[in-house]
Image: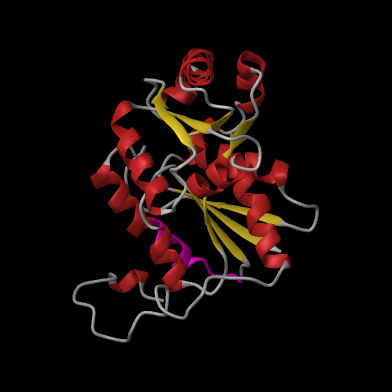
Amino acid sequence: MRILVVNVNTTASITESIGKQAATAASADTEIVALTPSFGAESVEGNYESHLAAIAVMERVRAYPEPFDAIIQAGYGEHGREGLQELFDVPVVDITEAAASTAQFLGRTYSVVTSLDRTVPLIEDRLTLAGLDARCASVRASGMAVLDLERDPHAAVDAIAEQAVAAVRDDRAEVICLGCGGMSGLAERVVERTGAPVVDGVTAAVTIAESLVRLELSTSKVRTYAPRRGKNMTGWPPPQQQV
C-alpha cells in the first residue's frame, strides 16, 4: 500500500517531519510518500494562503507519476479536501477530521490546540462542515507561528502544553487534538503535562487511510464528489502541469 501525505506549505523540513511521523503509525507493508507543493506559502496561516494551498496540493498530487492507494492532506483546518475527493478514486483523509473523529472514541469532549489565533476560525469552520463540532469543547491558540515550531521547539511545547492544560481545566476537554501538522511528534510531551489522551492528526489519518484501503472503501462518486465534467479550462492548469 502506498499513501501520499501532502504538506500544505512549501517548507521541505516540515514535509520531512510530517512524513517521519506518518511512518511511525504505518504498517510494515505501507509506503509513506511525503510531498511538498511546488508553489504556495512557506507556512499556511490564513484564508488566502489556505485557498492557494488547496490548489497547490491538488496539482502536486495530480503530478505524482506512480500509483497510490490513499491521500492524506496534512494541513489543519485547510481548504481542499473536497477537491481531492472529486479528482481521485482513492480514499482522501484530512488530518483535521481524522484527529477530531479519533478523539470522539476516547472521551466525551475534545479541544484543539493550534498555532495562531487567526487560524482558529478556519479550524472551527472545518469541524462544523465535517459535522464534528458538537463535541468540540474549544479551539485554543498557542500563539506560536507554524515556523516557530521548528525554530524554538522548547517554547512551542510549553505554549501548546499551557493551552492544553487550560482546555482540560477550564473548558472541560477530555481529549486534546494537536491542531497543526507541524506539531507532529509533540503528543507524548503534552500527555505528560495534561494527563489526557492527545491525538496527532497525521498518525490518526494514516491508520484511518489504511483501514479504508483494506476495507476496499473509497469516496462516493454518486453526487457530491462525482468526477468533474469535461469542459474547457481557460488558462488553467498551466501547460507544464497538464496531466
Q: Quadrant of the N terminus?
A: bottom right
On the question of residue 19 being in view, the answer is no
Towards the viewer: 41 or 106: 106
Q: Is residue 61 above or below residue 150?
A: below
Residue pictured at 59% horizontal, 27% vertical: 174
Q: Nearer the viewer, residue 42 or 112?
A: 112
The magenta segment is 57-67
Q: Decide if residue 79 is in sight here.
A: yes
Residue at the far bottom: name it.
Answer: 230
Residue 49 lies in the magenta-colored region: no
Estimate the x, y position of residue 159 in percent, counting from the top left: 46, 15
Image position, residue 232 (x, y; %): 23, 84
The structure residue drawn at horizontal position 39% and vertical position 21%, both measured from the top left corner, is: 144
Where is residue 158? Give x, y as percent.
Answer: 51, 13
Q: Nearer the viewer, residue 7 or 242?
A: 7
Residue 63: say if magenta: yes
Residue 97 locus on image (x, y percent): 50, 48
Residue occupying image coordinates x 34% and y 51%: 53
Say which quadrant the C terminus sits in: bottom left
The secondary structure that most of the magenta stretch takes on is: helix
Relative to 233, say whether 144 is above or below.
above
Does 238 sit above or below residue 139?
Answer: below
